[in-house]
Amino acid sequence: MTFVHQNEADPAKKVSENLVAHSSTDAYGQDFIPKLKNHLLGRLLRRDFDGDEDLQFSDEDRATVRIHGQHIYSAKLLRINYTTYDMRRDQDSINPRTHADVMVLSPETGPNAHPFWYARVLGVFHTEVLHTGEHSRNNGLQRMEFLWVRWFGLEPGYRSGFRSARLPKVGFVVEEDDNAFGFLDPSLVLRACHLVPVFDAGRTNMLLKTVSPTAARFLDETDDWQNFYIIIWVDRDMFMRYLGGGIGHIAQTSALPADDLDIDSEEDGEASESAAAAGSSATNQNNPHHQQAVQPGRGDLEDDSGDESDTEGLPVRDLESEEEEEDEEAEV
C-alpha cells in the first residue's frame, strides 16, 4: 500500500508537529499530536481499533512513538480499491475538499446492530514513525498512513430499514464529546458513502459552535446540517451491502439489523420520527458513534508501514497526492 506516488521528492505538504501541537485553537485540533500518537501506538501494538476511546496511554507510552523529523505529510486524494458484490474490482476516490464521507465495518453483532460506521475525512496523511521501548515490534523507521476524521453518529430514537421505508439517518457528533474528531486507519475504509442533508431539519451551530473558517467544514460553510440520510442505493454494490448476500462482500458479517426490518405499526414509526426530531440538537451525546456504544474493529495488518494486500476486508489502498500545486508548509 502506498500513500503517495513513490518518488524521492514526495510532493506532499509538510505539517510541523510542533505547530500543530501548540497553535491550534479550534476544538477539532486540540490535543492533535497526543491523540495521533495514541492512534499510532494502538496500531503499532496491533490492538483492535475501537475509535481510540479505550487507548489509555501515559505520557511515557506516547514518548516511545517518535515522528521522524517532526513532519507529517498530507495528500489531497485517497483512492479506495474494493471488491463489489459480484466479484469485480472497483475504486472510489475521496477528496477532503469535495467528496469526503466514508464508511467502515462495525463489529457490532447484536440483533439491532447497524453494520457500518460513518466519518467525514478532514485530511489524508502519512508520516515516518520510530517506535522504541520494550513493546516495540520494529526498531526501524515505519511509514504509517492515517486519516483525520470527524465522526457521524446514528440519530437516537430513529428507526430505519426496508420495511419501514426509511433511510439510515446520521448527524455529526457534538464537539463537546472527546471523540468527535479522531484518526482512522485507511485500510479499514470499505467505500465512500453518499450523504444527503435532511433539509427540513435545517442547519445548526450547536454541533460545532465556531462560525470561523475551520478545517472541520467545507470552505464555504459556517455551520452544519443537523442530520444526513445515508443513500443506500447510490449503486448496486452499495445496495447489496445493506441488503446482504453479496458474494464479494466476504468481510461483511451482517446487513441491516432485524429490528430495522420490523416496525410494529405505522404509528410507532411516526412516534419514533417525532422523537428523533425533538432530540436532533443533541445528536449522539451519550455515545460519539452509536447510541449503543459499539465501535468498528480493525483487522490485523501484516505490515503497518504500507504492505500491499489484496485481501477482502482490508482492500488495497492507493493514497495519491494531486500534482496541481507546489509544495507548501501547512498547519493543521
Image (cartoon, rainbow, N blue to C red):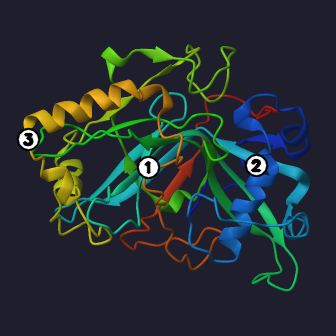
Q: Quadrant of residue 97?
A: top right
The quadrant of the image that shows the N terminus is bottom right
- 148 and 270: which is toward the camera: 270
Structural crowding at the residue carrying mark 1, measured as other residues with C-alpha within 10 Å and reported as few (<14), some (14–19) or many (≥20): some
Residue at numbered disc 3: 265
Q: Nearer the viewer, mark 3 or mark 2?
A: 3
Task: Compute the Cα span from label 3 to label 2.
Answer: 62 Å
Q: Position of residue 229 (x, y in %)?
A: 31, 33
Instruction: Please indicate whether residue 60 sits to the left or right of residue 3 in the image.
Output: right
Question: Which residue is found at the position 67% from the left and 48% from the top?
Answer: 125
Q: Circle 2 sits in a helix, a strand or a loop, which is it?
A: loop
Which residue bears the numbered disc 2? Answer: 9
* Residue at the disc numbered 1: 291
| Relative image position of residue 190 (x, y in whole percent) | 39, 56
* Disc 2 crowd, CA 10 A, few/some/many (<14, 14-19, 20+): few
Cα separation, mark 1 vs mark 2, equals 45 Å
If you read the primary sequence from the N terminus, does the residue marked by circle 3 or circle 1 appear first? 3
Image location (x, y in percent) of residue 16:
86, 42
x then y, percent, for residue 328? 79, 31
Q: Is residue 99 in view from this perspective?
A: yes
